[in-house]
Image (spheres, rainbow, N blue to C red):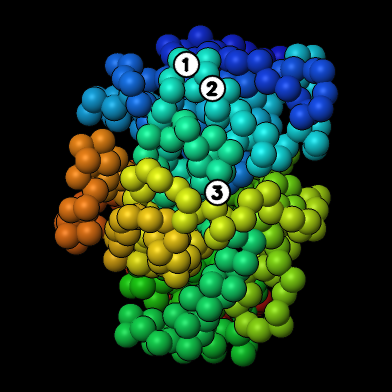
Amino acid sequence: MTMNAKRRRAHDRLAALPGVRAVRRPIRPDGTEDFDLFYVRTGRKSMNPLVVIPGGPGAASIALYRGFRRRAAAEGLDVIMIEHRGVGMSRHDDGGTDLPPEALTIDQVVDDVAAVLDDAHVAKATIYGTSYGTYVAAGVGVRHPDRVHAMILDSPVLSADDIDAVREATRRLLWDGESPDTADLAAKVRQLVDQQKFSPQAAQLAAAVYGFAGPAVLRRQLDLLLAGRLALWSALDRGARFLFERKAPYRHEPDLVGRIGYRELNYAAAPDGKPLDPAVAYREFDVDTTEFEAEPFDLVDAMPKFGWPTVVISGGRDLITPPAVADRIASLIPGAVLVRLASAGHSAIDLRERAALDIIKATYDGATLGLPARARKLDAAPGGLGVRLVIWAIAGAAVVEKAVPAAVPRTVRRVTAS
């Protein structure tokens, strides 16, 4: 695909924002052609700025995190964010054509981070990654350890084998009901599966609602499904499919780079034949990507060699990158500090921004050892207004839908992501 006039206008508007720059980068590791990789720097310049690497792959940086950077700069932080190659402003070659598949690998993304630091005249930075971005952040530690001042791994990814921990956590909570908060939820899920009303995508959506809004909201959703009330769940389902498959230009563009997650991080692992397997949902969400080949780093071997202050953030309700993965990472990195936000789901920087900013500031202040003692207070900090409004809207809509009687009897159909 080539850049059309509408996209060019949007590109030019973003390029004109304060602090936005481009650095020339090779399209292919062994090629001679270059393209413009864009990044943005916000706040008063400092010796060791904060480099934030979003999740995905597919999340943009410059437009999507504009509000975060403004708020972080207001608290004295110097923030650099890089537009991931194949996404948003870094999507095209000089002729306006999409970058080719061979341009899109984690190795090249990691080297892009180092190139941006060179262009910004930064010797060392604090690297903050969230979700997929933690693998890139750790990759910077592997390939460019001399550029790391400190590291914050939020909802981290460790390896292509993480799928086993995801399956175990999801089934323990939502199938076996081993937690007091989820015993009745699991009974409802098993009933829906028995009645063939719960597809793999619905299971993924349930895991996301549990992490994002908590067990009470998920309980209302499951009760609606059992009663044949599908309107709200279908709306959430469509939203999830949009997030996984559809492009929002300059904000979320997984269509080119999604292959990285499948090919290098085993997002769509071989199904194991048991219920609530997220690999099945990823395979059905898969949009012309590829099978797993190999991951670029052995982080289990590399992390014990990390020699900088590291904080690992884990949401107690995270079923996307579950606490067991964060626990293992914290045990691998010497001196790593684990901060468990008990009621949080996935990605603190997106859903618990206040807590994330406080953790970042403690890292710069050299006060990371005190963070575990502050975990309950950090967990109690509210999410941003937008996050709270979404949770309230979902919970309120569930109450309304449950209260209003159906005009005519409904035939309950299987919930899908269509």
Residue that mark 3 sits on: 135
Task: Give the number of marks.
Answer: 3
Q: State the image coordinates of residue 381 (x, y, percent, origin top left).
A: 21, 52
Image: 168 above or below 81: below
**Which part of the image, by quadrant, shows the C terminus?**
bottom right
**What amino acid does circle 2 point to?**
Val
Q: Are marks 2 and 1 in contact (CB under 8 Å)?
A: yes
Along the line of sight, the residue nearer the viewer: 416 or 59: 59
Q: Position of residue 327 (x, y in %)?
A: 40, 66
Q: Are marks 3 and 1 in contact (CB under 8 Å)?
A: no
Q: Position of residue 103 (x, y in %)?
A: 76, 33
Name the residue that disc number 1 marks. Answer: 120
Gap between marks 3 and 2 measured at Cα? 18 Å
Q: Which mark is residue 293?
A: none
Q: Nearer the viewer, residue 377 or 372?
A: 372
Which image quarter holds the N terminus? top right
Locate residue 293 relative to residue 65 in the image: left or right: right
Residue positioned 60% across, 60% down in the render: 159
| Foreground pick, 377 / 125 | 125
Query: Which of the two discs, 3 and 2, labels the residue nearer the N terminus?
Result: 2
SS assignment at label 2: helix
Q: Can I make out residue 358 in this image?
A: no
Type of the residue with mark 3: Tyr
Mark 3 surroundings within 10 Å by alpha-carbon count, few (fewer than 14), some (14 through 19), many (20 or more): many
In primary-sequence order, the first of circles 3 and 1 is 1
Q: Which residue is mark 2?
A: 116
**On screen, residue 129 above or below 275:** above
